[in-house]
Amino acid sequence: MAIKSTRYSDKDLERFRKLILDKIGKAKHDLELIKSAYMNDHNNGTEDTAPTFKAFDEGSSVMSKESNSQLALRQEKFIRDLKTALIRIENKTYGVCRVTGKLISKRRLKLVPHATLSIAAKNMQK
């Protein structure tokens, strides 16, 4: 009877490390875009328009900033989760479900590289 491995091989871990580093780079780039949109004043030239339109534009601007702020927070959390996944790779615990102790499928890890739960464990939470 074959014993099933409880961790991914070093070769697999290296592939996942490269995937995660690539995702971190893209996520940081996206975060900078979100932050620049949040910080930019975007003067749309409403100074000479009717007060009603100016108020609408200012309200829209506030909503946009709030939305961008939420996006930035989510992106920062995503980056933190990816960095934590890199630590698990270094510890050789990456890809092991924290509930079942079994390997998370490679397909799931490629789609959600910071996953710590297998699909079975995730479904148990519902």
Image (cartoon, rainbow, N blue to C red):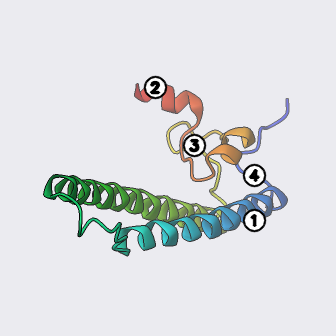
Location of mark 4 (residue): 8
User: Three-letter amino acid code at disc 4?
Assistant: Tyr
Distance between the Cα atoms at labels 4 and 3?
Answer: 12 Å
Disc 1 target residue: 18
Give the mark, 2 or 4, whose residue is nearer the N terminus: 4
Left or right of 89 in this view: 40: left
Residue visible at 23% across and 67% down in the picture: 48
> How many neighbours does mark 3 have within 10 angstroms: few (below 14), some (14-19), or many (20 or more)?
many
Q: Quadrant of residue 93?
A: bottom right
The answer to whether 8 is drawn above or below residue 10 in the figure is above
Mark 1 neighbour class, 10 Å CA radius: few under 14, some 14 to 19, many 20 or more: few
Real-space CA distance between mark 2 and mark 3, rounded to the nearest whole angstrom: 13 Å
**Residue 47 against residue 96 in the figure, above or below:** below
The N terminus appears in which quarter of the rendering? top right
Residue 8: percent from left, percent from top: 75, 52
**Foreground residue, 34 or 102?**
34
Q: Which mark is residue 97?
A: 3
Q: CA distance from mark 1 to mark 4?
A: 15 Å
Name which residue type carries label 3.
Answer: Cys
Disc 4 secondary structure class: loop
From the viewer's perspective, is residue 55 above or below residue 117? below
Badge 1 vs badge 2, beta-carbon distance below 8 Å: no
Q: Residue at x 33, y 62 (%)?
A: 69
Which residue in the protein does label 2 denote?
Answer: 124
